[in-house]
Image (cartoon, rainbow, N blue to C red):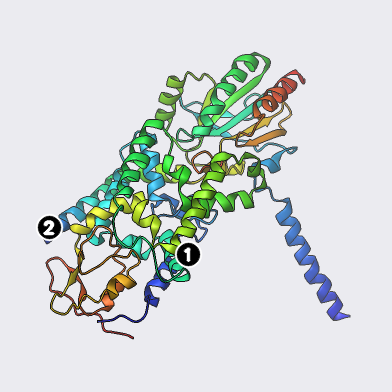
Amino acid sequence: MRRNALLALIAVGVALMVLGGLRGDYWTILANARTICLSCIGIE
Amino acid sequence: MAITRPISPRRTVIQAAATAFANSGFPALKMCPYPGLNCYACPLASVACPLGSLQNFFVLRQIPYALTGLFLAVGAAFGRAVCGWVCPFGFLQDILARIGPRRKRLRTQRGSWLRYVVLVGVAGLATYAVGAPLFCKLCPAGTLQAGIPQVILRPGLRGLIGALYWAKLAILAAFFVAALLVKRPFCRFVCPLGAIYSPFNRISLMQLSVDRTACTQCNACKHVCPVDLCVYQDPGSDSCIRCLECTRCPAVKVSWRGKAVSEPATLTQ
Amino acid sequence: MKRLLFLVLMLGLIFAANADAALRINTPEGFVGRNSPVFTLNTTGGDTYGLRDKPGYVYVLEFWSIACSACKIAEPVLEAVHNQYDSQGVRVVGVNIADTAAAIQQYVSRAGLTYAQVVDRIGNVTSLFKVYATPTIVVIDRKGIVRDVHVGLRAGWEQQLLGLVSQLAEEG
C-alpha cells in the first residue's frame, strides 16, 4: 500500500479518536472501567 | 548468519516498563484504552482494556469510534508491534518461553486463524447477541490480573465463586503450561486483540524486509522469534508481532514504506 | 531514657496509622451499622433525589449499569420489592454508575421497571459508598443507618433482602 494512503489511514484513525472523544466514548470507557462488573469478569 | 543471544534486553525492559505503567495504580487514566491486553479490573490497573471496552460498546449497541480509531492508527503505523512490545500478557508468555524447555511444540503458523474465530465469534457476534462481554468472562489475562487478586483482596467476594470461576482458573493454568511448551500460544491462536492488529501487518508503514542475497536460511530468526515465525519465508506474516528480535540478523531489516531501507542492526554478540 | 521515649513515640505513630487505616471504610460492607452517607442525585427525568428528601423512609439502593448482566438478575426482585412495599414507605432506587440518562430511560422502559432511577455517571456517590463492583445493594433503615450490603448476588440473597425489607418496613 502506498505511503500516502497509509498516512491518510492513520489520520483517519486519529480523527476517529477525536470524534469518539466528542461523542463521549472516553467517558463511556471510564464509567464502565471505574468499577468491576462481577459478572463480566467471571466472578459472579 | 547466527544470532547467539536468545532475547534482546532492551525489549524486555520496555515490556516490563509497559506492564508497570498499565498497572501503576492511578485510575485517572482509565478513560484511556491501552493498546495491549490489560484487564481494567486489576486492582492496580491505570488504563482500560481495549478489548473489554470494545465488547462493552457492542453490549451497549454503541459505535466504538474512538476504539476503532485507535486500532486503525496503531495498526496502520506499526502493524502488530503492540503485541511484541507493550502487551503484559505477551510479556508473561515470553518469560515462560524462556523458562520452559528449549525445544518447543507447534512450530508452524498452522491454526493461527483460530484467533479470528475468537474475535468475530466470541468477542463480536456472541457478545452482541447475548448482551454481555463474553470474551472477558474467559480471558486468562483477566483471570491473572483481576480474577485472582480481587478474590484475594476482597474476602466478601469469595462466596460468589462458582463454576465459571473454576473454569477460568483452569483456562489460565492451561495457558500457563502451554506457554512453557509452545511459543506464545495465546497470542497465536486465541487473542482477539491480536487478531485485530494482525491484518495490518501486510499493509502497515512499518515492515520487515529480508535481504535474499545475505540470507543463508540458517533459521536463527525462527529460533529467536517469540511466535516461531520463519521470517525469511514470510516477513509480512500476520502472525509477526514486530518485536524485531530477528533484525539482529543483518539479513533482516526494519523498513518504512516510502523511505530508504534503514541500516542493519549491528551484531551485538 | 531518651531512647525509650523515642521508641514509644515511634510505636505510637505506627499504632495511630494502623488505627486510622483500620477505621477507614474502604468497602461498602464497612458501612453496616453506621450512618449512611447523605447524597443527592438527579433522576433520569432531571429531578433531584436525595437521601434526606423523605426522612423516616427505608431505602434500597442498587448500584448497577446496563452492561452488567448480573444486575439484570436483581431487577425483577427489586421491582417486586418496590411494588409490594412502596406504600409502606420503602424507596427502591437504582443508582446507575455508567450510562447516560437517555440510555437508562430507554433500558428501563423496555425492561418494565418502575422504581426510581438516578444517574451517577460522574461517580461521586459511588465513591461515597465505596462501591467497587456491580451489582451492589445497600439497605438503609428509617433512622438512616445502613443495615445490609450485598456485593454481588450470592445464594439466598433474595430471601435475605426480602426478609430485611419486610422487617424494616414494619419498624416505626
Q: Is residue B188 above or below residue A26?
A: below
Q: Which residue is mark 2?
A: A1
Give the chain of mark 2.
A
Taking the spot 30% from the left edge, 47% from the top edge, the residue there is B116
Label at residue C75? none
Q: Residue at x 37, y 42 (%)?
A: B123
Task: Pick the residue in front: C46 or B122.
Answer: B122
Identify the chain of the residue marked 1, using the numbered disc in the image.
Answer: B
Check if mark 2 and mark 1 are on a common chain: no
Mark 2 crowd level (few <14, some 14–19, many ≥20, 10 Å Cα): few
**Residue picked out by circle 1:** B20
Which residue is depicted at the point 46% across and 55% down?
A: B175
- Callout 2 secondary element: loop
Specify the quadrant that holds the C terminus of chain B.
bottom left
How far across and how far down the image is residue C26, in percent?
A: 65, 48
Q: Residues within 10 Å of mark 1 (few under 14, many from 20)?
A: some
Q: Quadrant of residue B158?
A: top right
